[in-house]
Amino acid sequence: MIFSSITTRCQTSPTTTTEGYTTVKTKKLQAGAKLIEIGRINAQLVQLQNIKIDSLNQRIGYLLAAIKAHVEKDSANAQVINTYKAEIDNVVSQRDIAIKEMKHQNKLYRGQKRKLVFSTLASAGITAGVFLYLKSK
């Protein structure tokens, strides 16, 4: 993952490096960074699903306009219209599937945002606790 080596630096610790900082590695901060990335990916997936649904709706509109353009005067036009109607049914079912996927992705995204808030609060608490602990020594 991108954030595999996140560290927190606390000033005024009894065991300092040459820079005057102590490095505190924590798996909670790394997990929080992973949650942030997953949340960003889920948000992008939701946007892609919305784009897909819009393009399918646009395609349905074009097909409906094509049906209106053809007048049922003979059997050839009737076959063309039936072909367009079958394609519309296919595109509508694809759109419905895309809407279901988008709703599922939104659900995952909301859950990820909730996890991010809790991990952020936990990380801040841990960081403050480590700082206070190191400061008290």
Image: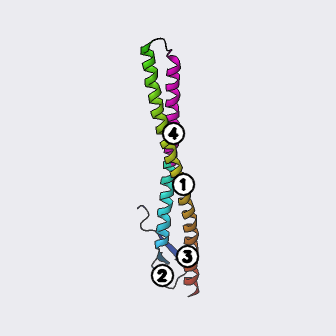
Image height of 115 relative to 24, above or below = above
Q: Which mark is residue 130?
A: none
- Select label 1 or label 2 by which is in front: 1
Asked if residue 1 lies left or right of residue 112, the reply is left
Q: Which mark is residue 53?
A: 4
The magenta span reads 46-72
Q: Earlier in the sequence, mark 4 or mark 1?
A: 4
Instruction: Please rate how many residues cluster around mark 2, counting C-alpha atoms within 10 Å: few if below 14, some from 14 to 19, many from 20.
Output: few
- Give the labeled residue for mark 2: 16
- Select label 3 or label 2 by which is in front: 3
Image height of 85 relative to 22, above or below = above
Alpha carbons under labels 1 and 2: distance apart = 45 Å
Q: Amino acid at mark 2?
A: Thr
Picture quarter with the N terminus? bottom left
Q: Earlier in the sequence, mark 1 or mark 2?
A: 2
Between residue 63 and residue 117, name the one nearer to us.
63
Image height of 11 relative to 115, above or below = below
- Give the labeled residue for mark 1: 107
| Residue 51 percent across, percent down from the top left | 51, 40
- Give the labeled residue for mark 3: 126
Residue found 50% across the figure and 54% down from its top: 40
> Contact, CB < 8 Å: mark 1 with mark 3?
no
